[in-house]
């Protein structure tokens, strides 16, 4: 039984080393990724500035939204104990 333990440990060791070396060789010969080139980047779109909190709160749409939201509150009750 002791000889089988030695054989299995040797097999695991050799298989681990072989797979490590094979993976290293595959990665070493893989094509390299493209380097970042800022000349190839398209310009970013121009966005409108974000309104401040005071502008949002002072608009009439936000006031009507918040008042409509408060009126439509629903209460869910379960029949459990």
Image (cartoon, rainbow, N blue to C red):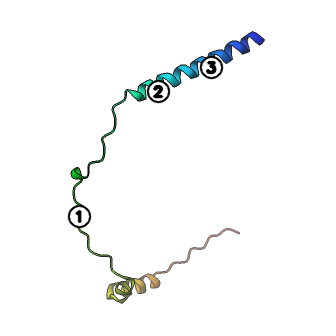
Please tell me how crowded label 3 is: few (under 14), some (14-19), or many (20+) other residues with Cα within 10 Å: few
The percent coordinates of residue 14 (x first, y second) are 59, 17
Q: CA distance from mark 1 to mark 2?
A: 43 Å
Given residues 46 and 73, the one toward you in this image is 46
Disc nearer the start of the sequence (3/2):
3
Residue 41 horizontal/vertical position (percent): 24, 53
Q: Residue furthest right?
A: 1
Q: Up-down: is 21 above or below 67?
A: above
The x, y position of residue 53, in whole percent, is 39, 83
Where is mark 2, residue-wise?
24
In the rendered view, tell whether residue 3 sits above or below residue 55.
above
**Residue at 31% over, 43% down:** 35
As rendered, which of 66 and 48 lies closer to the eye?
48
Disc 3 designates what residue? 13
The C terminus: image quadrant: bottom right
Mark 1 highlights which residue?
45
Viewer-closest of 64 and 8 = 8
Q: Residue at x 52, y 25 (%)?
A: 20
Q: State the image quarter where residue 11 is shown.
A: top right
Q: What distance separates the C-alpha of mark 3 from that of mark 1?
A: 56 Å
Judged from the image, the secondary structure of the residue bearing numbered disc 3 is helix
- Provide the secondary structure element on which disc 1 rests: loop
- State the residue at coordinates (49%, 80%): 73
Dividing the image into 4 quarters, which one contains the N terminus? top right
- In the image, residue 71 sits, relative to residue 23, either above or below, namely below
Residue 29 as seen in the image, left or right of residue 19? left
- Distance of label 3 from label 2 (alpha carbons): 17 Å
Give the numbered dot on residue 15: none
Mark with earlier residue (1, 2)? 2
* Label 2 SS: helix
């Amino acid at each position: 039984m002791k000889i089988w333990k030695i054989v299995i440990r040797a097999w695991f060791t050799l298989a681990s080393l072989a797979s490590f070396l094979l993976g290293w060789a595959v990665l070493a010969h893989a094509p390299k990724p493209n380097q970042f080139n800022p000349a190839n980047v398209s310009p970013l779109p121009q966005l409108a500035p974000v309104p401040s909190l005071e502008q949002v709160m002072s608009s009439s749409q936000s006031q009507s939204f918040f008042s409509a939201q408060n009126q439509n509150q629903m209460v869910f009750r379960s029949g459990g104990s």
